[in-house]
């Protein structure tokens, strides 16, 4: 890639935008970063930008798009933005931060260096846990990995930690010139937004954890959303592999349709809790590996008892199976996979236990930003649940929660913009209380809860009406719960 003196516009300034802009600037590109938000809203990110990066905020002027040699868009930027469409009509390349990182890793590596292999994880729910667990397994198996993507670490920043990045920027580093090892794998969580703008991106291994309704405020239909997810294997070839959730109808539907018309198909494997598959399956409470051709003790080898897996819940069992299949297919030793399943403690904001107070357990599931995620979280508890939900609606179908709310939710405490919509869908099924803010919701839950109950923050909504992001929401929740006195 020749980037020096190229005029490149980076659209969207959050983590990905900062990473892309700074990386491009260090290659000598003439970078302009643009965001429709004003400087006051972007101050946190502006302070992270290289001084050489030109900034245009508050609008999207046509000239910075039409004069660009290339445009790099952050995941949150709608791909149907008119300025991008006009730029595309003029032949100006429009790519995403993921694509940029992929091209730099593979097109600017030393001539004698190996192709950097990517392991990509996508899906609606469980992406982050699956990605982090996969990275944990690969490291335990002795592989050098870089973790990044939608999990919170911009890949354009993470590549600086590799030998390729160090060789490219050795002049700027000036300190600690020791050679870093080339990574064996980049382990990346990949959202549908990121996949919209890929061109060459080709992971050696890919998994679709599940596809359920989400982001329907951006996509016109579940099919359009599923098609975006399926792009993860669009460029895969016969020596790559794809792992699918055999129990998820939408995943199998979209994958079957796309694979049927694909010329070069990857090797396809599955994971399942309910049936025998080539991949990873569950038999009588035990997780089995049934991947042919692996150096295992037998063609169908028991890996671990399901109850030995440290992260709990039905959805986490699926995440564990998905990560196991990916790791084993990528060459990770079976013993490293087993040990990882016993040791990996999970991620913040995903059914994260906070504390027990007066016999009531409090859980932070702020990452539960859609209805399907909340359903699986509620199903994880045999105890009565006091559910704190609400936020910015993503066109969620809250009525799908009716049966679970009626059977398992002792009280429903609602916050945010979607509170009235959720109340209309579910409010007559259980005790329902409206709260003005999260702190108040926590106090109400304390007043309602009795010994043996679970208080669960699992919003089924985005966080942006009241919080910076789901992490901010989860951390505030943990603070408020920690402040409760016995």
Image: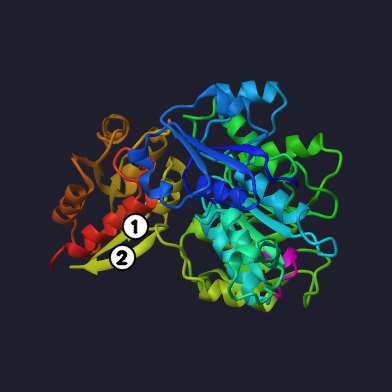
Which of the marked residues, 1 or 2, is nearer the chain's N terminus?
A: 2
Which quadrant of the figure contains the C terminus? Answer: bottom left
Which residue does the image show at 57% across and 45% down from the upper left? Answer: 191
Q: Residue at x 37, y 58 (%)?
A: 381
53 on left or right of 4: left
Query: How far across and how far down the image is residue 472, in percent?
Result: 34, 52
Whether residue 177 is situated above or below residue 130 in the rendered picture: below
| Residue 444: percent from left, percent from top | 16, 50
- Circles 1 and 2: CB distance less than 8 Å? yes
Q: Quadrant of residue 176?
A: bottom right
**Rendered residue at 38%/62% (across/down):** 352
Snapshot quadrant of residue 480: bottom left
**Which region shows up in magenta?**
327-333
Magenta stretch encompasses residue 331: yes
Q: Residues within 10 Å of mark 2 (few under 14, many from 20)?
A: some
Q: Is residue 270 placed above or below 340 in the rendered structure?
A: above
Relative image position of residue 31 (x, y in whole percent):
58, 41
Check disc 1 and report the residue beneath it: 364
In front here: 128 or 304? Answer: 128
Picture coordinates of residue 332 (x, y %)? Answer: 71, 71
Cα–Cα gap, marks 1 and 2: 7 Å
The residue that appears at 20% across and 67% down in the rendered structure is 357
Q: Is residue 283 visible?
A: no
The quadrant where residue 86 appears = top right
**Which one is in front, 57 or 352?**
57
Q: Kindly state the secondary structure of the residue where label 1 is placed.
A: strand
Q: Which residue is mark 2?
A: 354
């Amino acid at each position: 890639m020749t980037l020096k003196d190229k005029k490149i516009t980076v659209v969207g300034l959050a983590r990905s935008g900062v990473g892309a802009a700074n990386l491009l600037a260090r290659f000598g590109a003439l970078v302009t970063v643009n965001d429709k938000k004003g400087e006051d809203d972007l101050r946190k990110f502006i302070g992270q930008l290289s001084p050489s990066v030109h900034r245009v905020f508050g609008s999207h002027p046509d000239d910075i798009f039409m004069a660009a040699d290339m445009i790099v868009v952050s995941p949150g930027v709608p791909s149907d933005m008119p300025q991008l469409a006009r730029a595309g009509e003029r032949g100006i390349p429009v790519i995403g931060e993921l694509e940029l990182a992929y091209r730099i890793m593979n097109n600017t590596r030393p001539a004698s260096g190996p192709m950097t292999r990517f392991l990509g994880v996508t899906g609606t729910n469980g992406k982050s846990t699956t990605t982090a667990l996969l990275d944990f397994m690969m490291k335990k198996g002795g592989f050098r990995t870089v973790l990044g993507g939608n999990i919170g670490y911009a890949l354009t920043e993470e590549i600086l930690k590799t030998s390729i990045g160090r060789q490219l920027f050795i002049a700027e580093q000036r300190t600690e010139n020791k050679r870093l090892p080339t990574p064996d794998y980049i382990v990346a969580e990949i959202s549908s937004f990121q996949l919209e703008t890929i061109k060459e991106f080709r992971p050696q291994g890919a998994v679709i954890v599940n596809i359920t309704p989400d982001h329907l405020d951006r996509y016109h239909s579940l099919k359009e959303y599923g098609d975006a997810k399926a792009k993860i294997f669009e460029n895969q070839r016969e020596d790559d592999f794809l792992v699918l959730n055999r129990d998820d109808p939408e995943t199998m539907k979209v994958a079957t349709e796309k694979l049927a018309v694909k010329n070069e198909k990857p090797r396809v494997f599955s994971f399942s809790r309910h049936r025998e598959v080539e991949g990873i399956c569950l038999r009588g409470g035990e997780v089995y590996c049934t991947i042919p051709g692996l150096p295992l003790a037998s063609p169908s080898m028991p890996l671990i008892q399901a109850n030995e897996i440290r992260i709990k819940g039905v959805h986490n069992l699926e995440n564990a199976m998905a990560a196991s299949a990916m790791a084993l297919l990528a060459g990770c030793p079976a013993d490293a996979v087993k040990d990882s399943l016993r040791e990996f403690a999970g991620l913040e904001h995903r059914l994260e236990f906070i504390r027990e107070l007066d016999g009531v357990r409090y859980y932070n599931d702020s990452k539960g930003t859609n209805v399907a995620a909340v359903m699986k979280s509620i199903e994880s508890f045999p105890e009565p649940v006091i559910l704190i939900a609400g936020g910015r609606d993503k066109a969620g179908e809250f009525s799908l929660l009716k049966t679970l709310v009626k059977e398992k939710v002792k009280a429903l405490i609602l916050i945010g913009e979607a509170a009235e919509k959720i109340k209309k869908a579910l409010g007559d099924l259980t005790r329902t209380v409206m709260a003005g803010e999260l702190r108040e919701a926590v106090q109400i839950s304390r007043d309602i809860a009795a010994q043996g109950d679970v208080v669960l923050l699992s919003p089924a909504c985005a966080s942006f009406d009241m919080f910076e992001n789901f992490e901010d929401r989860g951390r505030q929740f943990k603070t408020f719960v920690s402040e409760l006195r016995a």
